[in-house]
Amino acid sequence: MSSTPVAGPPRFAMRGIRKVFGATIALDGVDLSVNQGEICGLIGQNGAGKSTLMSILSGALQPDAGEMWIEGRPFTPHSPIDARRAGVAMIYQELSLAPHLSVMENIMMGAEPMRLGLVDWPRMREMATRALAALGHTDIPPDAIVGSLSVAAQQIVEIARAIAVGSRVLVLDEPTSSLGRADVEHLFELLRHLKSQGHAIVYISHFIEEVKTVADRYMVLRDGRNAGGGDTASATHDEIVALMVGQSVGNLFPRSPRTSGEAILEVNALEPGAASFALHRGEIFGVAGVLGSGRTRLLRTLFGLEPVRSGRVRVGVYSGVARPHERWMQGMGLLSEDRKEEGLALTLDVADNVTMSKLSPFGPAGLVFPARQRSAAMRWIAELAIKCAGPWRKAGELSGGNQQKIAIARLLHHDVDILVLDEPTRGIDVGSKAQIYRLIDALVADAPDHKPRAVLMVSSYLPELLGLCDRIAVMQRGRLAEAVPAASLTEHDLLMAVTAGTAA
Amino acid sequence: MTTRSLVERAGTFVGLVLVAMIFGMLIGPQFFAPTNLELMARQMAIVSIAAVGMTIVIVSGGIDLSVGSMIALCTVVIAQLLRMGVSPLFAAAGAIATAALCGAVNGALITQLRVVPFIVTLGTMLVIRGAAKGLGEERRIEAPATWLNDLLRVTRGEALLPSGIWAVILLSVLVALLLRYTRFGRHVFAIGSNERMARLCGVAITRTKIVVYALSAAFVGFAGLLQFSKLSVGDPTVAVGLELDVIAAVIIGGGSLSGGRGTVAGTLIGAAIMTVIQIGCSQKGLANWVQQIVTGGIIVAAVALDRIRTQSGTP
């Protein structure tokens, strides 16, 4: 499956791309080029800069330095519309289709054929049919309502739209995450077909095996730089993982003396998640897995936010399924991965956000005295060094790191024994990260005055799991594997395990 | 009280003072005479108490369009009960209970059928109006005169204000305290601000929402009692479209239709602004259509100003 060498300039090229956000260098001199009739796999860990790079290609962000060309002509998109006009089509995990409209309307959206100022329906049907036929998918009727199609078929509609409007560069971001095996095979066939027609494709995936199967070349990003790349035919999984893993982060992760105590959470054959494990006091249990592997769903199921299909859960002395308010009463608290949509009420003040799960200490008979509520919040503001003018400030006015501390403070205010943390450091600055690491470590450390707590955490950032956790279990395509001691793992091993899930 | 929320509340209050001053200058000092102020208070009582209830619903992120119909139903219920020889106190209680039941049904439909409040209460607006007409046999129901007819009577200096207005003031204070100083009140804000967070925090969302609609409707029931007092008959066709005045009062007062924001004090000021415009216009001899244009403009301007103010406040 080697690409035929082509004469002339590559279909698109990026050179020396640099992008800085505040103090963070997201991209530092990245090069990427793809020829016509070629599929290039783009690989990198979370935070390596893949999405920033693709945002620049798609015009959503402007680079601070560097140049881009499409077919040898300079390309400087100022908005996604510019990029689309120049022929760059992005297909994200979350498809951007109008579910209530028909397949043909979606395919021809924004480029509807008109006659005398009215939509020319026969011609629209003809053009959409032709676009689908070009992809070898005459099985999708142009009159079908998009929302009634399978995810795989919707993805094809989105690709058909990109082709129909004359896109020359196609970027697919994690296209297989919501597809079944057979659909993945079909998608790969389609991509090879598009390649043979001369399209240039960038294929982003966590799954190295997928990239090896479908792509001609690969490029690895690490810490905002080109870490390496080459022909997929000659590369091994091991070599690619080695390129993704950087040097160790050092002693960002404190580790106080810990003693594993009683099992405070026991999970037996829980579905969804195929999970069986026990969590002990004085222990941090990590769940590693790529986005969409089912790790968040597992935590939400444990907490009663999603239904249990089968299996047993025991929290302390309580057995069986429970709703969130019962979990709180049983001494379990969940930190949501989605701070803005679920974790916090941004229009309410800090005190309300910290104390909402437990207002009972602030007055008798259902009363809440704001002064007591605020002084409770003040305690956590001081203890977690939250930067805000006071507990009456709206949560939405704070920075990401301080917001995250407020969400964590809720679990501390409730004084739970089991802290279930979903991506505890997502999207926050390095200083806040270090503080949160110290805090999590202190929660499970040996202490003379109270029993150590237990932490169950999910993270996409593998060094964080390796640095903090005692045991780690890998979640893959909805199934949780057996836990292994973190000390026996290297980042390389863990990344191998997490990315091994081959679709084909 | 923080300076920030003081400024936020003062914004609406400044609006009220401005509107009052404009009409004061147009009409003269008699606009502020005690009898005229009392007239305004009597005029705004019905919308005010219904709007205080609506504040709870809007803070929770909902809306209730069945308010006008509930008021009509309540006047009919009171009239029918009085004709049956029920004591005035029980007739009033019966009306308030009827309204609370309507509200509980609204809440149950919204939470159990998972249909948005706008649609559910649009439906029950018609259902309740129909029920009122059925119960009233499509005509006005005469009722024996009782003390219920005196709730909004002019005091002529005997008392400071009519008893109905004192009740409105007392109930408003209670709701303000309920929203600020109880677990229920904080849960209502949490649900309105971010329902997913409320669920994560273990707030009993279904139960709280049903209570919100039932409680709000109980205040509408009281508005129905005042409406009966004003009419002294049961009228199934009264208060058509009143829900829009009620919602407007909450919105002018700083409530947000997306939930999580709103205060009783703001709502009362909102109701006062609309009343001053109505009474001011009619005393100035301006036609009804002028009133409507001015009130409509104020609603849009108030919300637009509020948007600008909150956007500049947050980074």
Image (spheres, coloured by chain):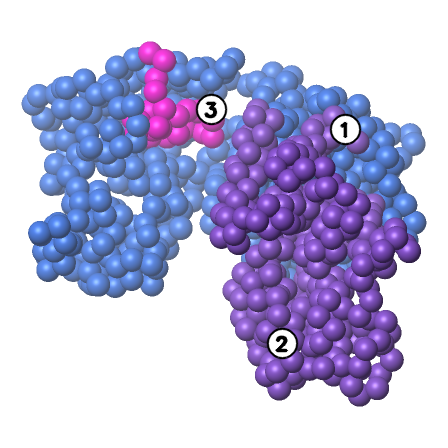
Q: Residue at x 87, y 80 (%)?
A: B87
Tell me the mark number nearer the camera, choosing from 3 and 2.
Answer: 2
Nearest to viewer (mark 2 / mark 1): 2
User: Which chain's residue wears label 3?
Assistant: A
- As displayed, is residue A478 above or below residue B90? above
The magenta-colored residue range is: A42-65
Q: Secondary structure at mark 3?
A: loop
Q: Nearer the viewer, residue B255 or A314?
A: B255
Which numbered disc covers residue B2?
1
Q: Which chain is blue?
A: A
**Residue B133 position in % (x across, y down):** 60, 81
Point 15% across, 54% down: residue: A119
In the rendered picture of this protein, how many numbered marks are placed on residues?
3
Residue A103 as seen in the image, left or right of residue B167: left
- How many other residues sit within 10 Å of disc 3, few (<14), some (14-19) or many (≥20)? many
Amino acid type of the residue that numbered disc 3 sits on in the rendered structure: Val
Q: CA distance from mark 1 to mark 3?
A: 50 Å
- What amino acid does circle 1 point to? Thr
Tell me if residue A51 is in the magenta stretch: yes
In the image, residue A31 sits, relative to residue B120, either above or below, namely above
Location of residue A98 in the rendering, given as x and y in whole percent from the top left corner: 33, 52
Among the 4 quarters of the image, the one containing residue B132: bottom right
Report which residue position mark 3 lands on.
A245
Q: Which residue is labeled 2 in the image?
A: B236
**Residue shown at 74%/73% (left/top)?**
B232
Chain letter belonging to callout 2: B
Q: Quadrant of the N terminus of chain B?
A: top right
